[in-house]
Amino acid sequence: MAKKKVKRVDLIFKGCDCNKVLTDALKMPKEEIIQMLLDSELKGRGGAGFPTGLKWKMAAAEKGNRKYIICNADEGEPGTFKDREILDQIPLKVLGGMALAAYVTGAREGFIYLRHEYRFLIPKLEKTLETFHQWMEDFELDFTVKLFIGGGAYICGEETALIESMEGKRGEPRNKPPYPTHDGYLGKPTVVNNVETLVYSMMVMHIGSGEFKTMGVKGSSGSKLFSISGDTPKAGIHELELGMSLDDFVKEFGDGNTKSVQVGGASGFCVPRNRFKEVHVGYEDGLKGYSIPTGGSMMLFNSSRSMYNVLHNYLVFFEEESCGQCTPCRVGCQQLLKGVEAVKYGEKSHKYLDDLLHLAATMKLTAKCGLGQSVANSFSSIVENFREEMIY
Amino acid sequence: MQKRESAIKAAVQKHGKERKNLLPILQEVKQIKNYLSRSDVAEIGVEMGLALAHVYGVASFYHFIDLEERGQNIIWVCKTISCSMKGSNDIVMTLKERLKIKLGETTSDGKFSLLETNCIGWCHKGPAMLINDEPYTDLTPEKVIQIIDDYYTNN
Ligand SMILES: Cc1cc2nc3c(=O)[nH]c(=O)nc-3n(C[C@H](O)[C@H](O)[C@H](O)COP(=O)(O)O)c2cc1C
Ligand code: SF4
Ligand code: FES
């Protein structure tokens, strides 16, 4: 097991001739591009970690000539801000990734689903789209991209909720399967990729899959942008190789007094100090100990922080952002929030926390989508590790 | 009223009547007065040939499509944890005092509404807020007072 120290990378924001990368890539057979992505083992950077090459391959295999490419720029996970920076600094790399996906799958229309909170980026993006569409003409690739602005709802980052909202409906997640690659926007095959994933697909074309795989560890290849906030002297966006231990991460980014790190935002896990050494940041396979896949949100808390306040803040977030479609999540979020308040104010005995842990576990099993299923991640990891702070 | 009705017609004409255009149409009509009234919602339904219940259901789903009357400018202060740890509460308190309103209210001159929202993607530069589409970061009480004063002098 390769144990990696924190390794900085400068790939995403580094200047690169996107036009040249596209010129070369669009001369390659489609299968070869898919193979390069598969070889690179690039996984989705939006949080779920689905292999990107496989997603494109599935959409490419679908029949019909109406397919869509959607760039998921709904970035709503608390503590994440890297997609905003990417769209601000290097929008052409994102669009380049969309063009690759379009070429490979045969899609002719694409959308950037931009969260409402990033509306200030619209003028810049519109301008970049003009350049991009000129390129598409030059490359004779029949592909146009439009902006679609979200209405303000965290759940619309979930790909099927995103599609529902683009179809003029409430952003309520669908059952999966069918997956969007088969039955997506307007019932057509649709590739939904995170902003950062699209950039990395360009970078794989640029540096090659072999070079890409020299970074990270097996199963979690390459690098990733981390959005780092909270009690740290180095708050900001940092591109790091995957597979590092949390201990090394905290040595680099902590303030010397780090009590816990929330990996993956409100829907991620809280890791207390005594487990920093055994926890690694990357996708499941290939990492010993515990590994946490993540959209890149890293929030550090030092010992002056009340973990009750942290949990309470997350629960308010979930209670507000639950789409309300399924009972375990709609009612569960409300009850967890009420429950921790009741224990804190002494209206319920501390044993009630066990009932709440049970409820969270039930939500994980029965909620319809990733939102309701992941409330238990932060809830259980905070309550189990900081039980006294919940009570006193 | 006349102006509003024609604006709705124009928005529907511009985007097209298909249901998939509902969100952009709601957003466009909302821009006019910073909120959608019940009659706007009904009107959009009629123009698009969609049930009022559907249009209302969609409009009420999204945080930034207000169905309550708002001021000319809407302030959204981030209340999520990273900003809260950096003092977003002080920012809200300062704004309440400066504007003489509570959260959810609008100033008597109709200039500002004060609201909270969840993470707006500036967590490393908290506390952060939006005024309309514009982000403001690394806020301090002094800084927000200056921002509000500037709004009053410039707009
Ligand atoms: C509640 C919820 C919120 C999500 N929010 C986002 C988001 O803001 N951005 C994003 O790229 N993916 C988000 N996802 C993941 C998407 O459903 C989807 O997996 C992702 O966009 C696929 O892109 P990728 O394979 O490139 O990661 C969210 C998932 C859930 C369950
Ligand atoms: S789990 Fe929550 S967000 Fe997901 S469908 Fe159910 S109610 Fe909606
Ligand atoms: S927590 Fe305030 S912007 Fe993210």
Image (cartoon, helix red, strand yellow):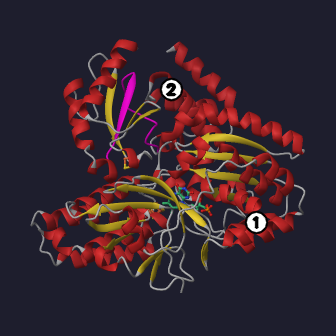
Q: Position of residue A130 (x, y in %)?
A: 74, 33
Say whether residue B27 is left or right of residue B127. Answer: right
Residue B19 lies in the magenta stretch = no
Say whether residue B129 is left or right of residue A15. Answer: left
Say whether residue A18 is left or right of residue A266. Answer: right
Tell me where residue B150 sits by quadrant. top left
Check mark 1 vs ligand 1: CB closer than 8 Å? yes or no.
Answer: no
Depth order, front residue of B71/A284: A284
Query: How dense is the environment of label 1, judged by Cα within 10 Å: few (below 14), some, or many (20 and up)?
Result: some
Which chain is disc 1 placed on? A
Which residue is farthest left? A346
**Which numbered dot is residue B31?**
2
Tell me where residue A216 sits by quadrant. bottom right
Task: State the CA–CA distance, disc 2 to disc 1.
Answer: 46 Å
- Observer able to see residue A151: yes
Depth order, front residue of A109/A237: A237
Q: Position of residue A12 (x, y in %)?
A: 62, 54
Residue B75 lies in the magenta stretch = yes
Q: Quadrant of the C terminus of chain A?
A: bottom left
Tell me if residue A175 comes above or below residue B43 in the rendering.
below
- Residue of label 1: A208
User: Magenta segment range?
Assistant: B62-79
Tell me where residue A54 sits by quadrant. bottom right
Say whether residue A186 is left or right of residue B118. Answer: right
Q: Position of residue A159 (x, y in %)?
A: 59, 58
Q: Identify which amino acid the numbered label 2 is placed on.
A: Gln
